[in-house]
Image (cartoon, rainbow, N blue to C red):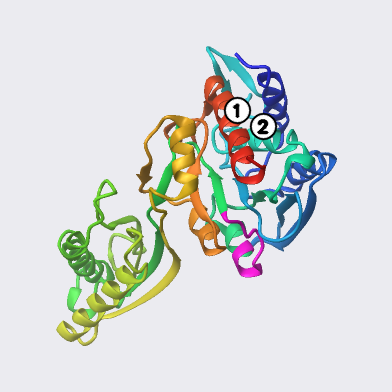
């Protein structure tokens, strides 16, 4: 299929063999990539941090072809979701029917293999503008590494290709991702005497009823037709409350998740949550609830006319799309890049046992990235 395939398969074999589950250190993968990049003439800088569990993590920023702002950044996240112990080949790349299986093969070690190969085979003498490779940590648990780059101002580029499994379709826009924890309080008592207490679960039910009403009315009035669905979505996926069947519950907690369209402030839903709380307090002065916003990640909306989007449309033969899930493109945009999401494999087979990347996708992705390096970083 391609003379690059053996090299891509070898790199991906090495990457999959490294267990970079988000809860573990990612240094082995960073060490591996840095050695390859430095051997090809890249200057590498590591950004170290410790995650909430005390585990050491690294972002890697590698540059070749001069100083100053890079013309192009190839960006991939080093971490993966956990794998089932029953998947005994999770860390061993296996091939069947034109597919390469292994944890991270699709999300996103396939892209990283393509980026490393495309970046390291370019002749330094041909570079007329800096080329950058960025590898991040903890994307799967909140885009943490990418946010650390923004805080430090590292990874600035004019154009960025952010690796995710998009079926080689350029993704120019994605929704944001936000979370809030809501705790509704009541008063415990014997369930045979309901007037001696106040049910936090019943109170939470009233809160959730109003939230559902606003989610299906007010939030659907603000639309971005580039997305499907074209409005900010709201979900309550976790709820917990009560101690026993015969105790009036004194507390009920639930998590609200919302995915804002890019032109809407990510705080829009948290403001609605506070509005609901205040209304319920007016209706019942003893009503008590606490709202803690955990995460407010913005979306991104790169123009279809942006050069990097138009380039990948031409290189891939696919029209640009939007997605409702989060990526690191907003952080690269914050760092000044026109960012597009692109990569081999399909997100629908990621995060599951038997994750794979098609061999054909891998080859075509590497070719597109190599062309991108030529286009943005070499004399024409």
Q: Which residues are magenta?
A: 149-158
- Which is the main secondary structure of the residues drawn in magenta? loop
Task: Please say whether residue 78 is visible from this viewpoint.
Answer: no
Within the magenta stretch, is there residue 377?
no
Q: Is residue 266 above or below residue 98?
A: below
* Mark 2, secondary structure of its residue: helix
Horizontal relation, residue 233 to residue 61: left or right: left
| Residue 230 vs residue 63, the one in the foreground | 63
Q: Whole-percent x and y of residue 75?
A: 60, 47
Q: Residue at x 40, y 63 (%)?
A: 179
- Quarter of the view holding residue 279: bottom left
Number of on-image labels: 2
**The N terminus sits in image quarter:** top right
| Residue 363 vs residue 234, the one in the foreground | 363
| Residue 11 vs residue 44, the one in the foreground | 44
Q: Residue at x 63, y 16 (%)?
A: 2
The numbered dot on residue 16 is: 2
Indicate which disc, 1 or 2, sits on the residue closer to the N terminus. Answer: 2
Q: Whole-percent x and y of residue 72?
A: 61, 49
Asked whether the residues under the numbered discs 1 and 2 touch, taking CB atoms below 8 Å apart as contact, a structural biologist would say yes
The numbered dot on residue 5 is: none
The 10 Å Cα crowd at callout 1, few under 14, some 14 to 19, many 20 or more, is: many
* Mark 1, secondary structure of its residue: loop
Marks 1 and 2 sit apart, C-alpha to C-alpha, by 6 Å
Q: Whole-percent x and y of residue 175?
A: 37, 54
- Farthest residue in the right direction? 39
Q: Is residue 313 above or below residue 270?
A: above
Task: Please say whether residue 198 is visible from this viewpoint.
Answer: yes
Find disc 1 in the rendering and name its residue.
102
Q: Whole-percent x and y of residue 15?
A: 70, 34
Q: Residue at x 38, y 40 (%)?
A: 320
Q: Residue at x 74, y 33 (%)?
A: 121
């Amino acid at each position: 299929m391609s003379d690059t395939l053996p090299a891509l398969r070898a790199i991906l074999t090495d990457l999959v063999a490294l267990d970079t589950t988000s809860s573990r250190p990612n240094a082995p993968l960073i060490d591996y990539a840095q050695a390859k990049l430095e051997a090809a003439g890249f200057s590498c800088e590591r950004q170290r941090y410790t995650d909430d569990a005390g585990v050491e993590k690294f972002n890697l920023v590698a540059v070749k072809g001069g100083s100053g702002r890079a013309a192009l950044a190839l960006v991939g996240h080093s971490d993966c979701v956990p794998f089932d112990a029953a998947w005994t080949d999770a860390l061993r790349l296996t091939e069947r029917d034109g597919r390469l299986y292994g944890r991270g093969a699709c999300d996103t070690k396939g892209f990283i293999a393509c980026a490393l190969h495309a970046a390291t085979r370019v002749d330094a003498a041909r570079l007329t503008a800096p080329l950058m490779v960025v590898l991040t940590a903890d994307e799967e648990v909140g885009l943490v590494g990418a946010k650390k780059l923004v805080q430090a101002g590292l990874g600035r580029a004019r154009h960025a290709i952010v690796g995710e499994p998009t079926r080689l379709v350029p993704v120019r826009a994605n929704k944001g991702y936000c979370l809030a924890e809501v705790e509704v309080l009541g008063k415990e008592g014997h369930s045979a005497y309901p007037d001696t207490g106040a049910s936090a679960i019943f109170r939470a039910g009233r809160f959730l009823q109003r939230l559902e009403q606003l989610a299906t009315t007010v939030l659907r009035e603000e639309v971005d037709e580039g997305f499907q669905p074209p409005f900010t979505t709201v979900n309550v996926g976790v709820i917990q409350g009560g101690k026993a069947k015969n105790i009036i519950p004194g507390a009920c907690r639930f998590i609200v998740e919302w995915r804002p369209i890019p032109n809407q402030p990510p705080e829009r839903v948290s403001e609605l949550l506070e509005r609901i709380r205040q209304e319920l307090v007016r209706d019942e002065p003893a009503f008590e609830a606490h709202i803690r916003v955990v995460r407010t990640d913005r979306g991104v909306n790169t123009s279809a006319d942006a050069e990097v989007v138009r380039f990948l449309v031409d290189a891939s033969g696919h029209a640009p799309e939007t997605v409702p899930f989060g990526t690191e493109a907003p952080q690269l945009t914050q760092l000044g890049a026109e960012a597009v999401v692109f990569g081999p494999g399909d997100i629908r087979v990621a995060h599951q046992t038997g994750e794979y990347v098609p061999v054909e996708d891998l080859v075509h992705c590497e070719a597109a990235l190599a062309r991108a390096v030529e286009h943005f970083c070499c004399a024409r």
